[in-house]
Image (tube, rainbow, N blue to C red):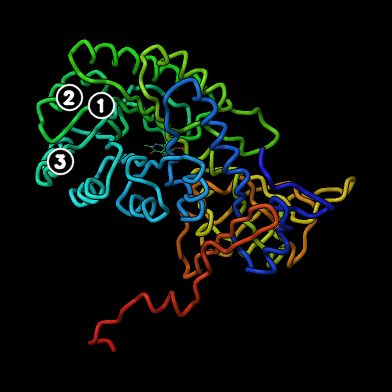
Amino acid sequence: MDHFLYRDGMLHAEDVPVADIAAAVGTPFYVYSTATLLRHFQLFDDALSWTDHLVCFAMKSLSNQAVLRVLAQAGAGMDVVSQGEYLRAKAAGVPGDRIVFSGVGKTAEEMRTALEGGIRQFNVESEPEMERLDQVARSLGCVAPITIRVNPDVDAKTHAKIATGKSENKFGIPISRAREVYAMAARLPGLRVIGIDVHIGSQLTELAPFEAAYKKVAELTEQLRADGHEISRLDLGGGLGIPYTRSNEAPPVPTDYGALIQRTVGHLGCEIEIEPGRLISGNAGLMVAKVIYVKSGEDRDFLILDGAMNDLIRPAMYEAWHDIVPVIEPQPGVEPTKYDIVGPVCESGDTFAKGREMPRLKPDDLVAFRSAGAYGAVMSSEYNSRLMIPEVLVHGDHLAVIRRRPTYEDMIARDTVPEWLA
Ligand SMILES: *Cc1c(COP(=O)(O)O)cnc(C)c1O
């Protein structure tokens, strides 16, 4: 459920007509709904209310400061994967003891920044990383709290680019070697082992892979405890999928996911962390674009938009489907037509949808890409020297630009020309 609905024939973001936002900031743009962000966070928080827990928002899915503040003020922690994300989370007012640091390639500088600024835990992904972190922590005279990310070798049954829990993926240490690696961690004085971490992939639309992974984590917890390790916290990752279209079956909901967690690891008495990204931010955002031209091809019509793959790369990168809806509600009974919906970027990959059924549109009409909050703005670029598009947050009938559109001068001024070319 989200808060982007037609009212009086006009698509609204909460109580704000989307067309009014377009008039205020121009197109294309992203708009996020505060109520939807909070609702989704709350679903996870409630689903774990049976135990000590922290829901850490995977901020790589949507990292605008304003969004982080909405979630942090509701009690969310943050899952960060870089120094930039760590510093953004801190700038948004998230205390260090609610930030977990994930990622396979943390540098010594990133470790130092997090240890000095405060960190809940590092999710360590390899032995060399463990040694590096031990050195950095000792050089600062502190001890780094860690979990070790295990790779449970389960098939997440998702797109290959976002599956992370098979043995061929670069993530975590093989669960078969976990006891050996935990023993090594226990010998390093700069580290304090507190738990286990697992994250098997993104956009999972079934619970079975989570169940398989969490059962392996439960077994490992008991083995590691028997080996004498303190395992008091389980970080179970993110990855719960969202419906990208209203017509297909609904993926599992946080309530069922929470129940699954209770069933598989609840008996261990561990504090539970989860790291959902997409399910919190995905359906909380739209990307809105304007029709520039309707072009008739030989066997199809093209809807050419002012938004492009540089603004929303998911269709080009993951063959992702986004529902694309007109901002003015289609009249019932009007015969739809089919379009290839494309952007202006100079490659054929800049195609959002092929043969998509839509009401007949004309230049200047607005369309909204649904479910664009996650992995949308954060993956955008200036490819083709197109300006990064603005982000807007709505809250009831309030609207705020939370990232302005830069100017062409801003863009050009970022390059520097060596003096011999001046
Ligand atoms: C990407 C990622 C997440 C979030 O995944 P979603 O599918 O957005 O929920 C959580 N944890 C880690 C370690 C990740 O890399």
Frontmost of labels 3 and 1 is: 3
Q: Which residue is mark 3?
A: 142
Under circle 3, the secondary element is loop
- Indicate the quadrant containing the N terminus: top left, top right, bottom left or bottom right: top right
Mark before the other along the chain sequence, 1 or 2: 2
Mark-to-mark CA distance, 1 and 2: 14 Å
Q: Looking at the image, which residue is at 83% across and 53% down?
A: 9
Q: Nearer the viewer, residue 19 or 170?
A: 19
Give the class, few, some or many, for how many residues have Cα within 10 Å of label 2's Cα (few <14, many ≥20).
Answer: some
- The correct choice, above or below, for 355 with respect to 204 in the image is below
Q: Which mark is on residue 327?
A: none
Q: Which residue is mark 1?
A: 194
Q: Looking at the image, which residue is at 42% across and 54% down?
A: 92
Q: Which residue is mark 2?
A: 181
Residue 158: percent from the left, percent from the top? 48, 31
Frontmost of labels 1 and 2 is: 1
CB-based contact (under 8 Å), mark 2 and mark 3: no
Give the class, few, some or many, for how many residues have Cα within 10 Å of label 3's Cα (few <14, many ≥20).
Answer: some
**Residue 209 in sight in this render:** no
Q: Looking at the image, which residue is at 30% across and 38% down?
A: 120
**Amino acid under disc 1:** Ile
Mark-to-mark CA distance, 2 and 3: 21 Å
Please tell me in which quadrant of the rendered image residue 344 appears: bottom right
